[in-house]
């Protein structure tokens, strides 16, 4: 590929921090594709997903609270997404609907909960309605007349375009999600609110890290400054907020159907963001004793928050409990007096029963030194505790048993797109999946000596994605890096714990805000 690169290309790669070798690897992946994940079986309650007793959960919460009082907990929130996808159907409707044309009313016949009809029938229940009403009034447009005359496109002009609130161009983090008696909260504000309950560290400090886009960072910073004083006074905490941008070095080359790099009018290679897997570098930059990871749109109204808060601490306590045991083992393996064979065998049993890492065939015949080497390799890694909810059709990676390169078997989060859909046996395993991970993760990024892991050392580079898209009417191919919570964490210690569905309340489309979990009243 180097022969195909111009001096301008080399300079562009250098500016982004992308090596020629990395660029070549990307082109090779476009040509060969990524290998499919080979599933062994689905992880279920019977095997792989832990159901914790009520007593154990209460003990975990107490363990976590004691830990957080002395340590630094950081809440990590990927928040770079724009709200345009959330308002996608409304944007398309606005571009085609005109009430003066009778046949346009056909667009409103679908009355399902995800429909345009449903949106307008319940528009006054959205937390942003009062702002919309005022924005229309400010423009000299009557909301009541628009409803009466069915001029819905005029309402949407004030909601999603720069003629009014411009929500179609805003970050999802700043869209008003929930209405309360004395305030309206955006998704960003809800994350601050949640952090005061389960991410309060030593000194009553709430540390949060938001990954944001460069065009939205100032808007988000401004909202925080508007909220800071009232929230700190109300909750008796101090906020420590960090923001980070996606590193240009994680961008990927875009190619045509023949795998030739695409170029813009000036002849420069066109790059695209490398997907959420690129945020691994942002995560790697955080210095914390424990990190709680949660998507920006996964929040709920205060009426439903108690379960969310409780189970976050349950997962946190599980991590503290397992980490204490893991660190104890590693210190023993690292001591001048090696543990006995009996103790080593008990460690191996812990790895298999508690961490769900099944050793290669014949491991029971290994000598003492080989067993110790294996234990050090499997124990000295980043740890993540993943909440798993019953699958009811929501999108998300599923929990599966997967064979590693060393023939050991461990738990992984796998997307359907990573499975060979022509392999009937693999499809059958996929269809037997009972749970999925809603990006509900508590993790630790430090080793038993207190030193940070280099997270790039624990990625499976062969778990990326190739997708077909259209740009200016032409087909293109895009590459996404290994997903943050699947391939990006493939070589982590992974423990799966069942949590109730009520802890998962995503807002993918605007009508999701009409679900009971996002309303201040019963549906």
Image (spheres, helix red, strand yellow):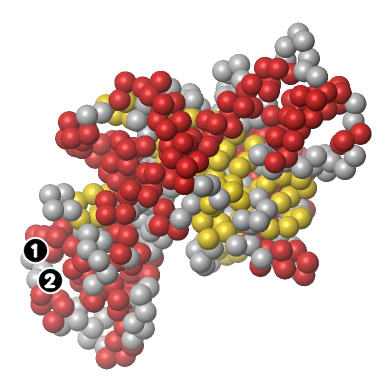
In the rendered structure, find residue 143 and report the number of the disc placed on it.
Answer: 2
Residue occupying the point 73% across, 40% down: 352
Residue occupying the point 18% across, 35% down: 234
Marks 2/1: CA–CA distance = 8 Å
N-terminal of the pair, mark 2 or mark 1, is 1
* Residue 40 in picture, x, y percent from top left: 76, 55
Residue occupying the point 31% across, 54% down: 304
Residue corresponding to mark 1:
137
Depth check: give the residue in front, 138 or 330: 330
> Looking at the image, is 319 positioned above or below residue 438?
above
Left or right, residue 511 beside residue 342: left
* Residue 56 in picture, x, y percent from top left: 50, 41
Q: Quadrant of residue 216?
A: top left
Question: Few, some or many C-alpha atoms within 10 Å of disc 1 (few <14, some 14-19, many ≥20)?
Answer: few
Left or right, residue 282 beside residue 457: left
Residue occupying the point 38% across, 48% down: 308
Left or right, residue 502 beside residue 127: right
Is the Cβ of the residue at disc 2 closer than 8 Å to that at disc 1?
yes
Quadrant where the C terminus is found in the figure: bottom left
Quadrant where the N terminus is found in the figure: top right
């Amino acid at each position: 590929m180097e022969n195909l690169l111009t001096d301008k290309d080399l300079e562009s790669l250098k500016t982004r921090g992308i090596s020629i070798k990395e660029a070549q690897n990307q082109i090779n992946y476009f040509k060969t594709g990524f290998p499919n994940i080979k599933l062994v079986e689905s992880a279920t309650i019977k095997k792989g997903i832990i159901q914790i007793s009520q007593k154990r959960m209460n003990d975990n919460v107490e363990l976590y609270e004691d830990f957080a009082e002395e340590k630094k907990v950081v809440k990590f929130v990927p928040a770079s997404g724009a709200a345009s996808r959330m308002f996608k159907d409304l944007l398309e409707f606005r571009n085609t609907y005109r009430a003066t044309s009778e046949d346009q009313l056909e667009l409103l016949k679908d009355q399902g909960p995800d429909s345009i009809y449903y949106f307008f029938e319940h528009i006054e229940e959205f937390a942003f309605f009062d702002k919309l009403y005022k924005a229309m009034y400010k423009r000299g447009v009557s909301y009541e007349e628009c409803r009466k005359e069915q001029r819905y496109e005029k309402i949407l002009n004030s909601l999603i375009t720069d003629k009014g609130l411009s929500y179609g161009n805003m970050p999802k983090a700043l869209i008003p999600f929930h209405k309360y008696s004395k305030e309206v909260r955006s998704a960003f504000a809800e994350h601050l609110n949640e952090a005061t309950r389960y991410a309060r560290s030593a000194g009553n400090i709430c540390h949060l890290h938001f990954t944001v886009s460069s065009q939205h960072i100032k808007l988000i910073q401004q909202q925080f400054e508007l909220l800071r004083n009232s929230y700190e006074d109300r909750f008796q905490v101090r906020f420590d907020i960090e923001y980070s941008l996606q590193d240009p070095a994680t961008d990927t080359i875009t190619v045509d159907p023949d795998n030739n790099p695409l170029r813009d009018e000036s002849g420069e290679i066109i790059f695209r963001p490398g997907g959420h897997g690129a945020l691994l570098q942002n995560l790697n930059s955080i210095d914390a004793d424990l990190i709680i990871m949660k998507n920006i749109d996964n929040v709920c109204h205060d009426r439903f928050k108690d379960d969310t808060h409780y189970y976050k601490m349950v997962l946190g306590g599980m991590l503290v409990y397992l980490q204490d045991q893991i660190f104890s083992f590693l210190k023993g393996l690292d001591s001048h007096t090696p543990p006995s064979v009996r103790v080593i065998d008990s460690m191996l049993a812990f790895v298999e029963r508690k961490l769900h890492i099944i050793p290669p065939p014949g491991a029971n015949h290994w000598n003492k030194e080989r067993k110790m080497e294996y234990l050090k390799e499997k124990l000295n890694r980043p740890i993540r505790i993943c909440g798993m909810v019953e699958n009811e059709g929501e999108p998300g990676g599923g929990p599966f048993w997967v064979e590693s390169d060393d023939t050991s078997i461990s738990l992984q989060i796998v997307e359907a797109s990573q499975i060979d859909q022509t392999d009937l046996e693999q499809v059958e395993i996929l269809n037997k999946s009972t749970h999925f991970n809603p990006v509900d993760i508590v993790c630790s990024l430090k080793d038993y000596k207190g030193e940070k892991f280099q997270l790039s050392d624990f990625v499976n580079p062969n778990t990326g994605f190739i997708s077909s898209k259209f740009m200016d009417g032409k087909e293109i191919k895009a590459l996404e890096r290994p997903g943050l919570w699947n391939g990006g964490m493939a070589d982590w210690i992974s423990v799966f714990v069942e949590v109730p569905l009520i802890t998962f309340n995503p807002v993918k489309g605007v009508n999701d805000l009409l679900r009971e979990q996002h309303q201040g009243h019963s549906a």
